[in-house]
Each structure stands twice: as structure tokens, then as C-alpha cells.
Amino acid sequence: MSFVSVPAAGTPVLRDTPQHIDAAARALAAGHGPIAIDTERASAYRYDDRAFLIQLRRHGSGTFLIDPEAEPQATRRMAKVVNEAEWVLHAAHTDLPCLLALDWHPQVLHDTQIAGQILGAERIGLSGMLEAYFDIEVPKDKGNADWSRRPLTDAMLNYAALDVEWLLELLEHCLDDLTEAGRTEWYVQECAHVLASASPLSANDWTSLKGLSSLRGALPRRIAHDLWESRDTMARRGDISPEAILRSRDLVDIAGRADRDRAGALRQLNSCLHHSRARMKPRARRHMAELLSDALTSETQDLETQQFLPPRNPTRGIPDHKVWPEEYPRAAAYSEAILSAADDVADRLQIRLDTVVTRKNLRQAAWSCWQAEDSSALDGADDPIAEWEELLGEKWSALGLRPWQVELLLDAVTPAVAAVYAG
């Protein structure tokens, strides 16, 4: 295996002027075939997940590194070229939001990570797939670097360019393997789903806070709301990561602690803000502490609003699956049969189960089966197998599974469900 740290054509220059970016667009337009694209972002350092570097490569054109922050208008003009081509990305779901925000949108999306998943690759990261297909090793040490800082070092420029250096060739090999395995249509459906599901980068709100679902009371949720809003305002104004001010897990922990230990919650907040990576000014720390104090002394009527009350039905009425064996044994029986059959499908195909279906979606199907049985919906059915197949197919389609996934699952799962019902 050979280690490669510099692209074959040498270190590309960073294009950060309108003239250089327009020239790159003309060169890409003169090339042929799909365009390999990657982005480097800096959400651990900056307010959002926008792109601070875009890497592009096309046959007949070469590799280009674009600075979209330095010249956003010139970068948007490139859409006239890139939007007419098919794109090749690796883990496209991470890059598409910031690209769509620049009005970039592909005609067709290719994702080599999806190809690796469907082919059952042991390692689906780009470096792992490059090793498997080309027997080369590339640097892996700068993915979490601060790509918003300038100037970028030659090592960073090389690292970024290598992310698209072999992407077009990797796609060709993957497509050949998919054709040989008879899985091309699966791949096409998955890539189309990722593209259709993507949306431009947008501002979050407090309900997107990771861990919020663990806060069930109105007071903890009011505290989470107020702290999140304050943190977001500071982060946006300073263009810094909200996590650098107050980590989300600490924010949720403080909000949850307030119900049982108000003084402790205040101490914890002050401690977290004192050790903040953002080096907050005393005035900002006092402001957040005052928000917490005000929330802790809120009147009951101020809390009992839809804004702070938790969702009434966050799990669509399905109890925690851990209680099924004891409280809903028939649902547990369906779940066990469905999971076993789905596992057999994944084993036979030699791919990960979550490439075919998530365990959550399997459990939701099992609960629907139990509900159908409990309501006697299938009593007297002329063809129970067909009835089960229709029920499961409709359920998984409604949950967003692609046709190839539904078809694979129905073939294996329907007989297993029918056997549980008959038993």
C-alpha cells in the first residue's frame, strides 16, 4: 500500500477572487462527465455548517478549490455550470445542505458511500474505500480542522484536494460492482432519496436541541428554551459555535436538574460558562445566569403553554419496546419474528441490517401487526398472507422505505408474521 499526501498535479491554489472562480467555472464547463464535489465546513468553530471550502474535479478539467466565503456571488455563479452536471459525492447528506444554500443542485446525484453500503463494504469511509479499491492511503488528520481560518496551509489544501482526487474513478468501480451484484436499482433509489430529502442549510430552533425529548416537565423545557435562545443569539452575533458557549448536553442536564436542585443547577451553569471555550465575558455569563434564575421563579401559569409543554404523543402512541414482552407479549412475538427475518435478509445479502431497514421501523411494523390482530381486522380473510403483505407494505412505504427495501422485506417477513398470527 502506498501513502499519498499530494495530488498528482501538485498542490492546487485556493481560488478566492471572482476572476479565479469564474475561470474555474469555464474550465469545468469545458470538461466532461460527472463532477466530483466535496466540502469542508467548520461547525465546531463557527455558528453554522456552511461551506468554507468547496473541492471540485472533472475529467478534462482538473481539480479546483473554491473559497465560497471570500466570494459568495462568484461561487453562486458557478451554479450555471455545476447544476447541468451529475455530481459524485461521498456521504452526500453531509454536504448537500451547504451546497443547496448556494443554489447548487445536481441533475443526478451519485454517492460512493451509499454504493459501499449496498455492496456490503467493511469500511464505508472514503479512506477505507480508497484503500480497498486502489491500495492507497491518504491523510486522515485534518477533517476536524478549522477550515474557516486563513491562510490554509499547503497540507490542508492537499488534504482537501485528495478528497476528490479518485472520486470519479471510485464511482466507476462501484457502478461495475453494483451491476455485477444486481443492485444498481437499489443504489439509484437510495441516491434519489438522499437528494429528494435534502434541504438548504437553515437556522435551527430550540426544539432541535439534542436531548430535549428527555425533558418532560414544563419548567425544564422553559429553562432549555431560554438558555438555548440566549446561546444562539451570542453564537450568531459572534459567528462561533453554540457548543463553544455551552454544550448541548450540559444545557439539557442543567434544565433537567432544576426541578430537583435549583441551587445546583445555577452552580452548574456558572461552572460551565466559566470554562466555556468561547471565553465569555462576565456580562454574558451574568445574563445567562439571570435567565436561569428568572425561569426558576416562573409562575405556574407562565409555564403551562404549548411552547413549553412536551409533545403529547412523541412516539406515535407506541410504548417503549422494552416493556413489550411483559405487557404486550403478542407485539413482542411479532417484533421478534420480524427482526429475525430481517436479520436473515441482511445476512444473505452480506450487508448491514440498517442499510435495509432500521430497527425502529421494524418495531413500528410489529406494533401495527399486533394492532391488526387485536382489532380482529384479519378475521375471516380469504388470503391472510396477502392481507399481511398489504399491511406491512403500506406501513413501510408510509415510513419512507424505498421500493427495493420494501420488496426485500416483504418476501422474508410476511411468512414469519403469518406464522405468528396462525400460532
Image: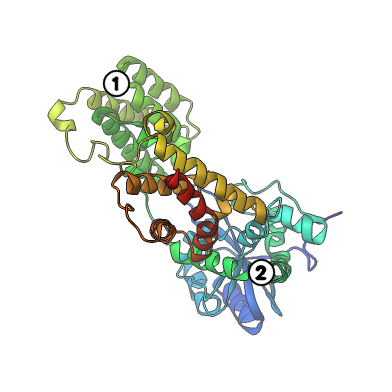
> Could you say which is closer to the camera, residue 376 or residue 21?
376
Location of residue 137 with respect to 228 vertically, above or below: below
Of callouts 2 and 1, the N-terminal one: 2
Q: Amino acid at mark 1?
A: Asp
| Picture mark count | 2
Residue that appears at 55% across and 79% down: 81
Q: Crowding at label 1, few (<14), some or many (≥20) Cα neighbours within 10 Å?
A: some
Q: Secondary structure at mark 2?
A: loop
Visible residue check, residue 268: yes
Residue that appears at 40% across and 61% down: 383
- Classify the position of the C terminus by image quarter: top left
Tell me: 298 left or right of 405.
left
Q: Position of residue 26 (x, y in %)?
A: 60, 81
Tell me: 286 left or right of 210.
left
Tell me: 250 left or right of 68.
left
Identify residue for label 1. 259
Q: Amino acid at mark 2?
A: Gly
Q: Which mark is residue 182?
A: 2
Q: Position of residue 353 (x, y in %)?
A: 58, 49
State which mark lies toward you, 2 or 1.
2
Visible residue check, residue 281: no
* Image quadrant assignment for residue 273: top left
Residue that appears at 67% across and 48% down: 142
Residue that appears at 78% across and 61% down: 133
Q: Position of residue 413 (x, y in %)?
A: 51, 53
* Image quadrant assignment for residue 17: bottom right
Q: Which mark is residue 148?
A: none
Q: Using the numbered discs, state the Cα–Cα distance from disc 2 to disc 1 in whole angstroms.
A: 57 Å
Q: How is the image coloured?
A: rainbow
